[in-house]
Amino acid sequence: MKKTTFFLTTLLALLLLGVVSAQQKPVTGYAPVNGLKMYYEIHGSGEPVVMLHGAFMAITDDWSVWISELAKTRKVIAIDMQGHGRTADVDRDMTFENLSDDVEGLLDYLKIPSADIVGYSLGAGVAMECAIRHPEKVRKVVSISFSIRRDGWVKEANDFWPNFTWEMMKGTPAEVGYKKLNPNPDGFPNFFNHLKATAMRPFDFGADKFKATKAPMFFIHGDADGIRLDHIAEMYRLKGGDIHGDMQPHPESRLAILPNTTHVTLMNRMTAIVPMINDFLDAKPAK
């Protein structure tokens, strides 16, 4: 009897372990979107949140821990944007308009009416442009370290790009990851130049259009992340900031500036940032 009980207990434990493992395994696929075969992963369950990586990044490694944390309570849809990760590049400008249209196309493909969007760097720009171009698709935006205009970056950041070459990326995690994941593993130099053209192209989302967006936004920055502090204040002000919150209702949008943090090291501040993101996404509109 004891042996039978032990056997059944062990079998049940193994079955439960299998169920948990199956639940943790993401749904993956390629979506035909605007001429792309866009790679995506879906983790967890709950309210949908789209995660958009930065330039030269991908879902694998760069976002994996963030995804795991957010997927504890949400359905996380992580995307490899044009040319990044497992999504091959195409002969099309990497504009914020095009990349935001890709997000809309993926949500349509997955039959998701609307979602929250979390973006870092390039992905943050795409997230904000989504709120402008596709307001019906966007509930809330978390923008981690980006601007709404090219001159929102400090001068040193904009001056860097003209002298930046793909040879400077040889052997870096960005190049190694590209070769490991991308359908065109030898295409890194062309991909680099394509992305560099995007970085050097003037852009301006438009203050009036940005102010008119309906989606609440959470701006997360480092105190030395390359975005001008006055520009950070401008973005927050356009979304209802710059008030005395004890004397009038607090805006639905939020701002956080992390000390001793740069553009790159923001990615190392997950334990501080993810709880703030969850609190923002969970917040209900003020009545």
Image (cartoon, rainbow, N blue to C red):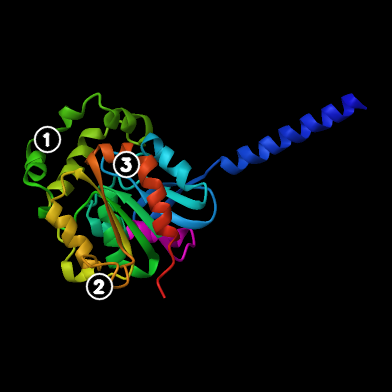
The residue carrying pointer 2 sits among few (fewer than 14), some (14 to 19) or many (20 or more) residues within 10 Å by Cα, namely few
Determine whether the residue tagged by mark 3 lies in a helix, strand or loop: loop
Q: Quadrant of the C terminus?
A: bottom left
What residue sits right under mark 1 in the picture? 164
Mark-to-mark CA distance, 1 and 3: 19 Å
Q: Where is residue 159 in the image (x, y as percent from the top left)?
A: 6, 42
> Disc 1 residue type?
Phe
Q: Which of marks 1 and 3 is nearer the N terminus?
A: 3
Q: Is residue 52 magenta?
A: no
Mark-to-mark CA distance, 2 and 3: 31 Å
Contact, mark 1 vs mark 2 (Cβ under 8 Å):
no
Determine whether the residue tagged by mark 2 lies in a helix, strand or loop: helix
> Disc 2 residue type?
Ala
Q: Position of residue 108 (x, y in %)?
A: 44, 62
Position of residue 43 in the picture relative to residue 4 (left or right)? left
The residue carrying pointer 1 sits among few (fewer than 14), some (14 to 19) or many (20 or more) residues within 10 Å by Cα, namely few
- In the image, 33 versus 129, the foreground residue is 129
Point out the stretch of residues depicted in magenta.
101-115
> Disc 3 residue type?
His
Residue at 37%, 64% in the rendered image: 138
Residue 79, visible in the rendered structure: no
Q: Does the magenta stretch include residue 109?
A: yes
Q: Quadrant of residue 267?
A: top left
What residue sits right under mark 2 in the picture? 212
Mark-to-mark CA distance, 1 and 2: 36 Å
What residue sits right under mark 3 in the picture? 84
Q: Residue 242 carries which label?
A: none
The mark closer to the camera, 1 or 2, is 2
The residue carrying pointer 3 sits among few (fewer than 14), some (14 to 19) or many (20 or more) residues within 10 Å by Cα, namely many
Q: Where is residue 128 in the image (x, y as percent from the top left)?
A: 27, 59
Q: Which of marks 2 and 3 is nearer the N terminus?
A: 3
- In the image, 211 versus 178, the foreground residue is 211
